[in-house]
Image (cartoon, rainbow, N blue to C red):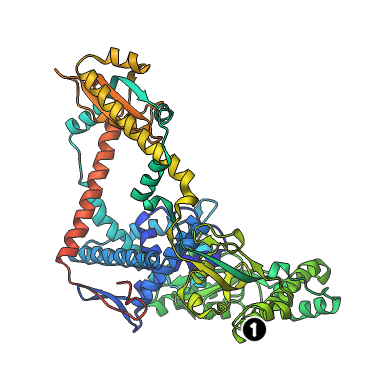
Amino acid sequence: MFFDKLRAGAQSTVSKVILVLIILSFALAGVGSYVSRPAQEVAAVVNGDEISAQALENAYRNERARLENQLGTQFSQLLGDPQYVAQIRRSVLEQMVEQRLLDQKVQELGLRASDEQVRNAIRALPEFQQDGRFDNDRYLQLLARSGLSAEQLRDSVRQDISRQLLLNALVGSSFTLEAEAGWLDRLSRQQRDAELVRLPLADFIARVEPSSDDAQAYYQQHPERFQRPEQVKINYLLLDAGALSGDEIDEQAIEAYYQANQASYSQPEQRKLAHIMVNKGDEARQKIQAIADRLAAGESFAALAESESDDVFSGGNGGELEWMEQGTMDPAFDSAAFALDEVGEVSEVVESEFGLHLITLLDVRPGQTRPLAEVRDAIAERLAREQAANAFYEQEQRLAELAFEFPDSLDMAAQELGLEIQSTDYFSAVEAPAAINDPRLLSEAFSERLREQGMNSDLIELGDNKAAVIHVIEHRPAAVRDFAEVEELALELAAAARAETLAAESAQALQQAWSEGEQGQWLSEQALSVETLNGVSRETRELEPELLNALFAMASPGEQPSLRIVPLANGDQAVLKLNRVSTPAEPSEQLAQIREGQSGIQGQREYQSLIQALKAAADIEYRNLPTLAEEF
């Protein structure tokens, strides 16, 4: 992906990109899908345009990286579900298909971003900015490091902006009538007065004394409440690189590493350059040669760069570029720039991927090497890590071999490697001990293969330089627990169920009494009180959400009282009586904002309608690739 390459070159964190559609385009498919179409397998064909399997794979990897960054360790657990992984692929491919349909519509309508729009968009990209301003040196260097030309970037950005023109025309044409927005504004500020009676579940539980027969009946009627999940007991060997201690790193090894890797501790020569560039074309060589002749005649390099260079970004600064190291630019440009011997010397005409250049040397920073004393500790730490990693790798390989050669138990592997066999009690897939609570290990522990064969598992890579081998000792299938085992729980649940029934019946009785105007006597008999709710708005946070939602869903009171029974999340019952609805007559200061928001929502609906219409009219073929055959 293009911006991934830019980030790798820049070695910095990238902020938000201004153009949302540019981000969408690059996040899904990357510039590579625009600029190169190698012969390869096809994931989908959209009206004759192919979406390659490689483009899909790149987009899928990018989406996985985004989700992993967003969800962290939770995403690793989700990856254990093949259906979830397949859904990510399907979602990514659908987005790519939709994007291709939009591109085809843009081409059909003849929409095209202007050169000025493209230039402004490129200048606004954070990747090319330094201290909030466009930096031409950074722009050229990052382009070179990414292996892309200015023309390729220009074409990709133009395509994204052209697509945005279509979407802006669609979404921008959406509107909401002022009367509609005004009604929504007044509704949002509506207030309601009501009365509330709560019937606590605890009061009814106190009245219930279930017997053993009641518990037995509840147990028979609700066996799913007493289900014991599938469980296993396992033995396992855990190999942890963090627990391996390496030998002391001697000075000779440190010095040998330093000598062999001096390039890593050296600052290579850097050069400050300026250039004049002419875009390739029929008269490019005549133009660049004329500039070279004027330089030879004594004209200022900086002045000519400002007036003649097609690289307008550096031209405004006399053609000056940032400090550069050898090997970071286009090969032809790089070779000519580092062949210059004297400050002020001008190269011959150089042809690069970007155009024709004249290059001059402005300044040189000699290379230098950091002394061993300065980097000794870092080298020792690196060698220690490598030593530990090598030891872990060797033990990992040996553990895999021993587990395979002696498949009936872990004893031989533990003895040779000096590891302790760990044993678990019965556990389920959702209640695994912390040390082995990894989806890859649990998948093996509950696999039918290990149970039937009674053999050691293969080596299981756990990440963070950890690995394990397991042996399933016992398996207990999912089943309903014996009544004797869950009798106490059955008593509690039977009592709760009976109490919930009594509470619901009481709520219905109160609703009936209230509708007949006899609630006072009923409440007195039940020792319950009425809670008055005045001026309740949709933003009121003192009420439970279910009560607030129910209150604003009730019809305004008429000849008959407006009453509703509301079951609460904690098991309590509540009875609401709506007394008064107050709706403001005049709009508020938020009217314009509400109208704008509704227009945006309408625009999104119209966008989805466009996508559905394009799909309905399109000829879309999804190919069954070997790696995707079970997912599409």
> In which quarter of the view is residue 376 placed?
bottom right
Q: Position of residue 239 (x, y in %)?
A: 66, 72
Q: Secondary structure at mark 1?
A: helix
Q: Residue at x 21, y 14 (%)?
A: 517
In the image, what residue type sits under mark 1?
Leu
**Viewer-proximal residue, 537 or 153?**
537
The quadrant of the picture occupied by the C terminus is: bottom left
Q: How many marks?
A: 1
Say whether residue 34 is visible: yes
Q: Residue at the bottom extreme?
A: 405
User: Where 160 falls versus 560 (above or below)?
Assistant: below
**Viewer-proximal residue, 183 or 362?**
183
Q: Residue at x 19, y 56 (%)?
A: 610
Q: Position of residue 533 (x, y in %)?
A: 34, 19
Q: Residue at the right extreme?
A: 251
Q: Residue at x 38, y 27 (%)?
A: 543
The residue carrying mark 1 is: 402
The quadrant of the picture occupied by the N terminus is: bottom left
**Viewer-proximal residue, 525 or 257?**
525
User: Where 326 falls versus 220 (above or below)?
Assistant: below
Say whether residue 188 is visible: no
Side of 405 where 612 appears, left or right: left
Circle 1 packing at 10 Å, graded few (<14), some (14-19), many (20+), is some
Q: Position of residue 6 (x, y in %)?
A: 50, 66
**Viewer-proximal residue, 65 or 492?**
492
User: Where 138 falls versus 415 (above or below)?
Assistant: above
Q: Residue at x 73, y 81 (%)?
A: 416
> In which quarter of the view is residue 467 placed?
bottom right
Q: Position of residue 30 (x, y in %)?
A: 40, 68
